[in-house]
Amino acid sequence: MPNARLLMTFPVTATSHTLAEYRARGGYGALEKALRQMTPQQVLTRLRIQMAVHLLHGSDTIASIGQACGFTDQSAFTRKFKAEVGVSPRAYRAQIAERAEP
């Protein structure tokens, strides 16, 4: 089960904002507005991608992460991930590795 903080990160980008940051900028208004403008399917996809972002910090394969997050095939996962995050899962993982190097 994913932790609540991960699921509430919004919007998903390489530099996601937490709810605390939204509160600091004037409350939940921006989050509420964004949620009202999304369909249930869009919210579900966003949550799946957020879980994938979290899992990409581990060592599982990209294909297995996509399956674990509810995507039927790797190409669908990669396409949705890139649309939400702005880079492919492989490029995102490479960015994580670059940041980890001293």
Image: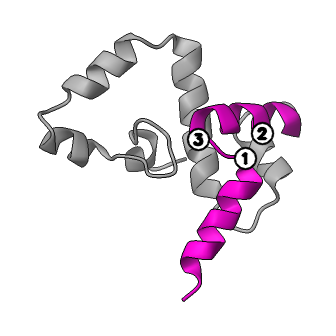
Classed neighbour count for the residue bearing mark 1: other residues with Cα under 10 Å, few (<14), some (14–19), many (≥20): some
Quarter placement of the C terminus: bottom right
Mark 3 → mark 2, Cα distance in angstroms: 10 Å
Which residue is painted at 76% across and 56% down in the image? 90
Q: Position of residue 17 (x, y in %)?
A: 35, 46
User: What amino acid type is highlighted by mark number 2?
Assistant: Thr
Earlier-in-chain disc, 3 versus 2? 2
Q: Position of residue 21 (x, y in %)?
A: 23, 47
Earlier-in-chain disc, 2 versus 1? 2
Which residue is denoted by mark 3 in the rendering?
85
Q: Is residue 93 above or below residue 52?
A: below
Mark 2 → mark 1, Cα distance in angstroms: 6 Å
Q: From where the camera sits, is residue 71 visible?
A: no
Please tell me whether mark 3 sits on a helix, a strand or a loop: helix
Which residue is painted at 36% across and 20% down in the image? 34
Which residue is painted at 64% across and 56% down in the image? 55
Which label belongs to residue 88?
1
Which residues lie in the magenta part?
A: 73-102
